[in-house]
Amino acid sequence: MAKRSLLCLNIMGKEYCTIKQRARHEVVIQKSRFVGDAFYVTSEDEALERLQNVKAEFPDATHHCYAYIVGQEGLIQRFNDDGEPGGTAGMPILQVIQNRGLKNVLVVVTRYFGGIKLGANGLVRAYSRTAAEVLDRAGTKRMVLSPRGIICLDYAYIGQVEYFLRQKGVHVTQAEYTDKVTLQVVVPVGWDEFCGMLREMCGGNVEFREMTPVFHSWE
């Protein structure tokens, strides 16, 4: 995990690491039940909506503590102890996310009090552990800022072009089949390089339109 975390921190605005999938993990400590939820989110509004969904699912819980980091630049970072002693819940969750170099992530830890007080140190350990274990379950993926655009070609070339796209690992996000074939793609190489290879393959009989790059996982 240490190597992955160090690698994820080296983003320089062109890539970042986040979770692979939505995850839930439960821990019982001294009769208190801690339910951890991890979400991929792309905005603060989405993070707050996910939080409200968790609260609605567990309306009788004692606490819903959380932390999230949103954005690639000018990061938004928030945490909340939701009634636990200050610094014992939200901040430990946030620190687990930070230490792994993750972004666009929300972690909510829901607690049902079991009747035994854990003390400040015990609470920090419990919330940190739950956050770490639910993130382990969610996994990690790298999102890379990747070229995106549209290609338009005649049906005569579609067979070899589709084979080429599969071989190169190009991600086709949209396809339209009218008088010509129009494909919207995200590519793992430079846009000019990609266009050059296709242009040569199709003898110049292909049209291109570059679009705004997007973050995409190539794992």
Image (cartoon, grey):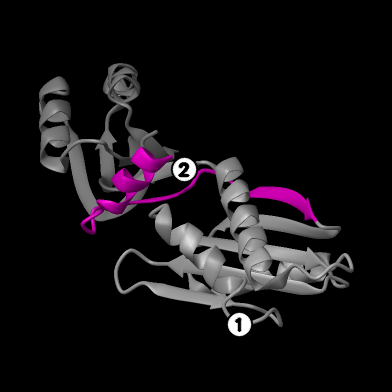
Residue 73 placement (x, y as % from top left)? 29, 68
Closer mark to the observer between disc 1 and disc 2: 1
Q: Is residue 138 above or below residue 169?
A: below
Label 1 sits on a secondary structure element that is loop
Choose between 63 and 205: the one closer to the eye.
63
Dot label at residue 86: 1
Quadrant location of residue 154? top left
Tell me the amino acid under the disc marked 1.
Answer: Gly
Q: With 26 as the anchor, is 126 left or right in this view?
A: left
- The local crowd at label 2, few if under 14, some if 14 to 19, many if 20 or more residues have their Cα within 10 Å, is many
Choose between 107 and 187: the one closer to the eye.
107
Dot label at residue 67: none
Q: Tell whether position 17 is magenta.
A: yes
Tell me the amino acid under the disc marked 2.
Answer: Thr
- For label 2, the residue is 140
Choose between 122 and 58: the one closer to the eye.
122
Q: Tell whether position 194 is magenta.
A: no
- The local crowd at label 1, few if under 14, some if 14 to 19, many if 20 or more residues have their Cα within 10 Å, is few
Quadrant location of residue 3? top left
